[in-house]
Image (cartoon, rainbow, N blue to C red):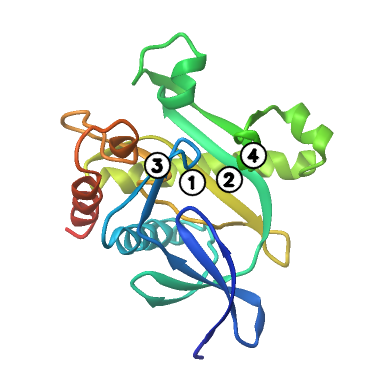
Amino acid sequence: MSYSKSDFLYEGKAKRLYKVEGHDDLLWIEYKDSLTAFNALKKSSFAGKGIVNAKICIKAFESLKAKGVGNHIVRVVSDREWVVQKLEMIPLEVVVRNRVAGSLFKRLQFEEGHVLETPIVEFYLKDDEKGDPLLTDSHIRAMNIVSDEKLEELKVFGFKVNAILTEFWKTAELDLVDFKIECGFDKDQNIMLGDEISPDSCRLWDQATGKKMDKDVFRFDLGSVEESYNQILERLNK
């Protein structure tokens, strides 16, 4: 079956969304070359960034799908465009942490890079205007975002994704420090992966040197983010 891109719907930090002609249950996603950090207060881009992220994400999604974790991709249309299933998106960012970094470093009395005895799962409200605040289970319950049962499913889902991705990134000689995923329900209320998995959404440190190779390179001016992202893709292609 062929698909045709239709009306423009929305432009986010890293992607544009369009309707798919004749298919109300599908969306057309186009990856942009933009880079943002600190809630889009810092902006940049590099040529082909969207293509690199899309290719990395497809590899991650394929690895997860092989272990029973579904995602929203229906058809890869080009190097930077997909047709995806429209999900009932959950307005939460699911964050799983294996080591101390980022906001966790600011909140806990551990050194950056401290290896956690067991992974931590956290939830953040998807709301740019409010700065995507950290939510407790009680907050989620009070806001009636998801049921207690579905919240527990999300936690199990996050830990399962973490276990698979940890091994996936090891194939590229990278340690998975932490990551963010966005999820939604399909028509049968199954939890599915939406959005993406890439160096934009994962903290990835070189196993041999500890060098940061993810978006922190851009956030904190640690070198060439273009070189880092391309190197990750090259390692995954070996």
Q: Indicate the position of residue 39 as horizontal and vertical percent values.
A: 50, 39
Which is more foreground, mark 4 or mark 3?
Answer: 4
Which is more foreground, mark 3 or mark 2?
Answer: 3
Q: Indicate the position of residue 41 as horizontal and vertical percent values.
A: 46, 38
- Going from the N terminus, do you reach mark 4 or mark 2 first? 4
Element at badge 2? helix
Identify the residue under disc 4. 129
Identify the residue under disc 1. 161
Position of 184 with respect to 68 (left or right) is: right
- Going from the N terminus, do you reach mark 4 or mark 3 first? 4
Amino acid identity at mark 2:
Phe
- Going from the N terminus, do you reach mark 3 or mark 2 first? 2
Determine the CA span between mark 4 and mark 1: 28 Å
Q: Which mark is residue 202?
A: 3
Determine the CA span between mark 4 and mark 2: 27 Å
Within the image, what quadrant is residue 26 found in?
bottom right
Element at badge 1? helix
Density class for disc 3 (Cα within 10 Å; few <14, some 14-19, many ≥20) is many
Q: Indicate the position of residue 221 as horizontal and vertical percent values.
A: 26, 33
Identify the residue under disc 2. 157
Residue drawn at x 60%, y 34% as measured from the top left: 131
Q: Which mark is residue 43?
A: none
Amino acid identity at mark 1:
Val
Mark 1 and mark 2 in contact (Cβ < 8 Å)?
yes
Residue drawn at x 43%, y 52% as measured from the top left: 197
125 relative to 116, above or below: below
